[in-house]
Image (spheres, rainbow, N blue to C red):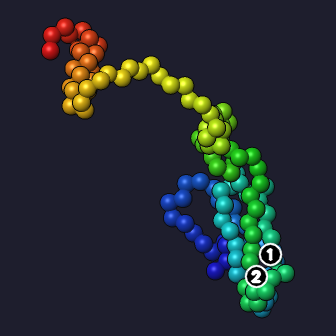
Amino acid sequence: MKPGSCVLEGMRNTAAYLDPMDATCCTGNTLDWYMVSGGLAIGAETNVIKDTQIYAHYPVQLKIGGALSEDLGNRIRRPNVFTGMTKKEAKNYEFPEGDFTTKAGTLNENWNRWNEESELYLCHKEDKRER
């Protein structure tokens, strides 16, 4: 099959067929060709790698040039530069301790006290004075 004999039904965009223009097989035949978007074909090029230990079929490389937005699409944005703390920096960082108080008592007493204070806090946030 040659590039011109391939028809893709329902394809709405233009496509370009890239032929390596060089034999991709030891018999002299061209077995590989590529189909790319019409906009990407402008800077595209192929390269047949014949200096390899593969005998029958040579590897073919397709190189698509252009800006990142042309390669990946206009809707994909580059991620923002990382401005946070690296893992190595975080290991050596002294995190400040928050305000806390320790009250004497058993585990159940502390748990009950914490529950009551938490419920009062939530009620206050919801402007409810009663429980």
Q: Amino acid at mark 2?
A: Tyr
Near-viewer residue (126 or 11): 126
Tag of residue 48: 1
User: Which quadrant of the view contains residue 48?
Assistant: bottom right
Give the Cα distance between marks 1 and 2: 7 Å
Q: Residue furthest front?
A: 104
Where in the figure is residue 121, as x and y percent of width and height?
A: 28, 16
Residue 115 is at least partly visible in this image: no
Q: Work out whether 102 lies above or below 123.
A: below
Q: Work out whether 10 lies above or below 85.
A: below
At 66% from the left and 65% from the top, the residue drawn is 35
User: Which quadrant of the view contains residue 4?
Assistant: bottom right
Q: Earlier in the sequence, mark 1 or mark 2?
A: 1
Tag of residue 58: 2
Q: Quadrant of the C terminus?
A: top left
SS class, disc 2: loop
Give yes or no for contact between labels 1 and 2 (Cβ–Cβ under 8 Å). yes
Near-viewer residue (113 or 129): 113
At 70% from the left and 81% from the top, the residue drawn is 31
Residue 110 is at least partly visible in this image: yes
At 47% from the left and 22% from the top, the residue drawn is 98
At 24% from the left and 9% from the top, the residue drawn is 127
Where in the figure is residue 101, as x and y percent of width and height?
A: 38, 20
Where in the figure is residue 113, as x and y percent of width and height?
A: 23, 22
Q: Work out whether 10 lies above or below 48.
A: above
SS class, disc 1: strand
User: Which quadrant of the view contains residue 93?
Assistant: top right
Q: Work out whether 131 lies above or below 58.
A: above
